[in-house]
Image (cartoon, helix red, strand yellow):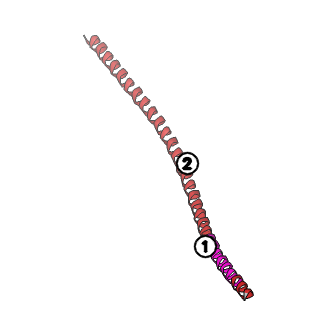
Amino acid sequence: EHLQEQAARLQQDLDESVASKSGTEQEYNALRAQLRTAEEELLSLQEAKAMQDEELATCQGELALANDNLAREADSLAQVQKEIQRLSDLGTSTSSTVEELQRELAACQE
């Protein structure tokens, strides 16, 4: 009888151990599945970040090119403004010369 009780206790301990092990394996498998999912999400996020980094680099390159073009346009505009001023000065000078010549002609005609 004592051996039967001991055998029953051992069987119960064995059943609990198997149940515990089974539960532990299920928990372990669930955690591994969560880990795999997290790793896949991390990889996906890393790929998305790499794509965004590439897009950012492209945009920065385009911005630098646009800034260079803008600087060239500003230089061209400054040159045009200088030419306009030169022509304006020439026009003023020509007007003064014409007026002076008209005065001289008038003086000669008198």
Q: Classify 8 as above or below 38.
A: below
Q: 60 or 107: which is nearer to us?
A: 60
The residue under the point 67% across, 77% down is 21
Q: Classify 102 as above or below 29.
A: above
The residue under the point 60% across, 67% down is 40
- Classify residue 105 as left or right of residue 70: left
Q: Classify 6 as above or below 88.
A: below
* Callout 1 crowding tier (Cα within 10 Å): few <14, some 14–19, many ≥20: few
Secondary structure of residue under mark 1:
helix
Q: 99 or 43: which is nearer to us?
A: 43
Q: Nearer the viewer, mark 2 or mark 1?
A: 1
- Classify residue 71 as left or right of residue 22: left
Q: Which residue carries the number 2 mark?
A: 61
Q: 65 or 7: which is nearer to us?
A: 7
Give, as a three-letter code, the residue at label 2: Gly
* The magenta stretch spans residue 56: no
- List x then y, in percent, for residue 59: 52, 51
The residue under the point 69% across, 80% down is 13
- List x then y, in percent, for residue 83: 43, 30
Which stretch is magenta?
A: 10-33
* The magenta stretch spans residue 20: yes
For the view shown, which residue lies furthest in the left direction? 110
- List x then y, in percent, for residue 42: 59, 62
Q: CA distance from mark 2 to mark 1?
A: 46 Å
Q: Quadrant of the C terminus?
A: top left
Asked if labels 1 and 2 touch by Cβ distance under 8 angstroms, the answer is no
For the view shown, which residue lies furthest in the front direction? 1
The label number, if any, that marks residue 30 in the structure image = 1
Q: Give the image quarter of residue 103.
A: top left
